[in-house]
Image (cartoon, rainbow, N blue to C red):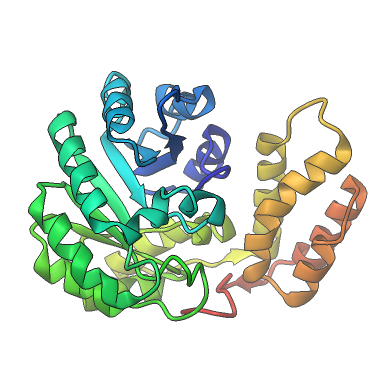
């Protein structure tokens, strides 16, 4: 997750169990690009004890090949090509999800990267740019090349993060492809995660926004799959998590309003699983004192919280 899956956030999430493998923020690749030092830091100083995959975004084949070769000199478990970012500033440059409009170009890029990458090579995609029907054109391209993993976010690019996740198309990919397939898109609870694994036949789940909202989700899913009781976090545990985020994400010397604005990025996701009043109030705070006042009002309690978003599909 760009501007989220930093070294600092990885450090926090790992203390709550964390995922089995981490993806970095994406390296922006173009003709004169260099490896962003802060992203490399999350690889070279990975504090989690778990593998980390280096993610790239771009459309220039020589530059992508050059970057992939450079990244293989660092301790990465795999190189990943992003075909899923739905941000307009990205897809208008024909990168990320924007490449889904040009299947032949995707074919050439994946072919070149498969030749250049000597460690596992993975791809993350959405099911199409405008329509889910485009997935029928994309799947044969992924099948053609010996990629080691395909992660499918089961929304289109223009759909962004709105409801209507097509998990049936993920199941179709899992049946058709020889490589493992991971499901991505609104994984929000341990029970739902177990159901998705069973219904789609995928080998794993990629969790994005749900990991910000609930860092406990990874361990909750593991407990569910082992048949154990799933423990829900209490309000005070959420409050403690927010304090950890604050301590790890805030840069000393940065002005107060900037610190508060940085934390709002995380609070927008947490608010999806809290209550409407919290989300309304936290978006309007400007000072540190008001930030913590709103957090205390919503989370200074010992009641368990499901942290499930109101819109679940």
Query: x%, y% of residue 250?
Result: 73, 35
In the picture, measured across the screen, residue 114 lies left or right of residue 303, that is: left
The residue positioned 50% from the left and 56% from the top of the image is 211
Q: Is residue 254 left or right of residue 90?
A: right
Q: Residue at x 48, y 30 (%)?
A: 39
165 w.r.t. 41: above or below: below
Residue lying at 66% horizontally and 44% vertically, measured from the top left: 245
Query: Residue 212, image x and y in percent?
Result: 56, 55
- In the depicted structure, whether residue 215 falls above or below residue 305: above
Query: Is residue 196 at least partly visible in the picture?
Result: yes
Q: How many marks?
A: 0
Identify the image quadrant of residue 122: top left
Q: Nearer the viewer, residue 62 or 307?
A: 62
Against 163, residue 85 (above or below) is above
Q: Position of residue 131 (x, y in %)?
A: 36, 75
**Residue 106 shown left or right of residue 265 in the figure:** left
Where is residue 197? Give x, y as percent.
Answer: 26, 70
Asked whether 59 or 193 is in front, the reply is: 59
Q: Is residue 217 above or below residue 201?
A: above
Residue 201 in view, yes or no: no
Q: Nearer the viewer, residue 134 or 78?
A: 134
């Amino acid at each position: 997750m760009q501007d989220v899956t930093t070294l600092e956030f990885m450090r926090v999430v790992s203390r709550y169990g964390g995922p089995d493998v981490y993806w970095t923020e994406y390296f922006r690749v173009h003709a004169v690009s260099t490896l962003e030092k802060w992203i490399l830091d999350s690889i070279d100083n990975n504090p989690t004890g778990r593998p980390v995959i280096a993610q790239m975004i771009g459309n220039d084949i020589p530059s992508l090949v050059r970057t992939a070769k450079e990244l293989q000199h660092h301790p990465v478990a795999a190189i990943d090509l992003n075909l899923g970012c739905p941000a307009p500033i990205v897809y208008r440059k024909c990168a990320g999800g924007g490449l889904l409009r040009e299947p032949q170009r995707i074919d050439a890029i994946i072919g070149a990267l498969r030749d250049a990458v000597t460690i596992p090579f993975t791809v993350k995609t959405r099911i199409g740019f405008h329509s889910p029907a485009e997935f029928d054109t994309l799947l044969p391209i992924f099948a053609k090349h010996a990629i080691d993993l395909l992660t499918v976010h089961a929304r289109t690019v223009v759909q962004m993060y709105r409801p209507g996740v097509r998990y049936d198309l993920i199941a179709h990919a899992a049946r058709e492809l020889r490589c493992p397939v991971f499901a991505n898109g609104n994984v929000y609870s341990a029970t739902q995660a177990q159901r998705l694994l069973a219904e789609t036949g995928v080998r794993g789940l990629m969790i994005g926004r749900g990991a910000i909202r609930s860092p406990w989700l990874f361990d909750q899913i593991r407990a569910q799959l082992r048949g154990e009781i799933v423990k829900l976090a209490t309000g005070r545990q959420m409050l403690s998590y927010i304090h950890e985020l604050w301590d790890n994400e805030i840069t000393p010397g940065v002005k107060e309003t900037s610190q508060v604005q940085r934390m709002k990025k995380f609070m927008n996701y947490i608010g999806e699983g809290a209550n409407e009043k919290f989300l309304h109030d936290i978006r309007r705070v400007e000072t540190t004192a008001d930030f913590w006042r709103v957090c205390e009002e919503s989370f200074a309690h010992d009641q368990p919280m499901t942290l499930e978003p109101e819109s679940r599909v």
